[in-house]
Image (cartoon, rainbow, N blue to C red):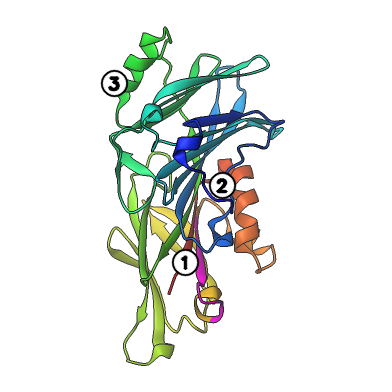
Amino acid sequence: MRDFPSCFGENGIQVSDASSSSCPPPPPAATTTTTQNLVTCIYHSKLHNSSSFIITLTWTKTLMGQLLSIQINNKPTNQSLCNLQIKPWIFSKRKGYRTHQVGPTSIIFFWDLSSPKFGSSPEPIESFYFAITINQQLILQLGDMEKELHKKMNNIGFNSSFSPNPVFVSKKEHIFGKKSSYSTTARFCGKGRNHEVSIECKTMNTNNDDDLGLVIRIDGKTAMEVKRIRWKFRGNYTILVDGLPVEVYWDVYGWFYGRLMGNGVFMFRSCLSAEKLWGSEMSWLNSLVEKDCVESSGLGFCLVLCVWKSE
């Protein structure tokens, strides 16, 4: 992974179109020895004329501070319209807007990341807004500062009466730490509520290390438990969340038999049969997730956790 340059030597945002490679999304964190947390969220959004787009947001926490990378692709052609990076550690770029023209397509980005509040991940949870418009239609709106956003849009003569209805397709989160318990939040269906998802690897009923188990909890309640996880390092199980069946897949081979900084991969998938996923080779999760979560947005929500144990 390339080093992040000094904030004094660059502008606060960068934009590139499909022909430029100066601003690609951050490469996977697994390729660097400098651990960093990142969350990638994928949304599917449509315009009134039925044009549809895949929007990929990557929230990253680095030694320099927070970084937001955005990529917009046409669907189904998958043509890249633009890439954008916002570096809110630069004071003058903590809030603002930016217009980008790609042929007949006009894209405007709005953001206020001057004082966001965070949980355990680099994705802000409150006191911020971020929005995207395409051809004068609001297609994505995030954050709890809706009034401030609409005031900003109205100040530049933008009609913000249209309410976006994007589909949250997938969330992929890289988590690093010297611990055996990890947690995040997820919404497994469009009208459901946010749930706390926690994963814990612990000794079960004895002092024998071979009796390590895997426990997954939803909102603090045990949803599934796997004993002797050293011998069951790959598998799947079905749990119920909001009355909806959610398939849970895990691969923790790297935790026990990998290198010093091993990783475990967990995937939570709603509205998808196990037969479809398990039709692929079991060498599986990492290569499957990127393609499947984007292409099958109509099948439900996909949460992927890449958990890294840094000793």
* Residue stretch rendered in magenta on the structure: 257-268
| The image quarter in which residue 25 lies | top right
Image height check: is 171 above or below 182? above
3D distance between C-alphas at marks 1 and 2: 17 Å
Which residue does the image show at 37% across and 10% down from the upper left?
Answer: 154
Q: Which mark is residue 308?
A: 1
Relative to the observer, which residue lies in front, 268 or 11? 11
| The image quarter in which residue 205 lies | bottom left
Which amino acid type corresponds to the residue marked 1 in the rendered image?
Trp
Which residue does the image show at 32% across and 42% down from the upper left?
Answer: 125
Q: In the image, 140: left or right of 82?
A: left
Image height check: is 101 above or below 280? above
Relative to the observer, which residue lies in front, 62 or 124? 62
Q: Which residue is mark 2?
A: 26
Q: Which mark is residue 147?
A: 3
Which amino acid type corresponds to the residue marked 3 in the rendered image?
Lys
Compare marks 1 and 3 and give the one earlier in the sequence.
3
Horizontal and vertical percent position of residue 271: 52, 50
Compare marks 2 and 3 and give the one earlier in the sequence.
2
Horizontal and vertical percent position of residue 18: 69, 31
